[in-house]
Image (spheres, rainbow, N blue to C red):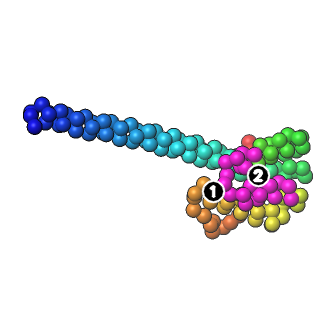
Amino acid sequence: MNLSSIMNIALSGIAGAVLALIGNNLLFNKRSKNYDLKLEKELAVYKYKTEAILEAIEFLENYIASSQIEKTPFKEMTVNELTIQARSCMDKLVVYCDNAELVETFDSIILKGETVKSKEYIERFKNFRTLCRKELGLKNVKFQKDEFYWCISTSNIK
């Protein structure tokens, strides 16, 4: 075997190794891009899920608070406006949340037809908040005094 044959074999081996490295690098970059896209999607979904949950909690809290001081909750809103806002919250929960019980609990709080001041109603709302924390991957928090102020009024405003 002469020197040029040995050089050709060595060069073809080196070329093969270089091509393998380039191919492996391209494959790694493609996997990395796919991972980045998947991560971006998961972060976006989590963000929208959080916003949907917070919007639903705020809606329910406002509903409960307004019904403590008025005979008709959200007196300033028409039934149609109230329905649209409730459906908007419900739709976002359905789209972004994985736990069907969370969505069903929201639905039962709005549509059950019982007095907002009942103990069962408030218990369902507290359960809803617990389900929301679970949906977001947060641990369950048990407050020592599980009472909440829905509406605070004062006549000492100057």
User: Does residue 46 lie above or below 147 as drawn?
Assistant: above
* Magenta residue check for 111: yes
**Rendered residue at 18%/33% (across/down):** 8
In depth, the one of 40 and 33 nearer the eye is: 33
Q: Amino acid at mark 2?
A: Leu
**Rendered residue at 9%/34% (across/down):** 2
Any part of residue 12 in sight: yes
Residue 43: give x, y in percent of width and height. 55, 44
What kind of secondary structure does the magenta stretch mostly adopt? helix
Write down the quadrant of residue 114 in the picture.
Answer: bottom right
Whichever of labels 1 and 2 marks the residue nearer the N terminus, that label is 2
State the extent of the magenta-drawn residues as a range: 91-112
Residue bearing the label numbered 2: 60
**Rendered residue at 75%/46% (across/down):** 91
Residue 99: give x, y in percent of width and height. 68, 57
Q: Amino acid at mark 1?
A: Glu
Q: Which mark is residue 118?
A: none
The extreme front residue here reads 1
In depth, the one of 37 and 88 nearer the eye is: 37
Q: Which mark is residue 135?
A: 1
> Circle 2: is it few (<14), some (14-19), or many (20+) Cα within 10 Å?
some
Mark closer to the observer (1, 2): 1
**Rendered residue at 13%/36% (across/down):** 6
Question: Which secondary structure lies at badge 1?
Answer: helix
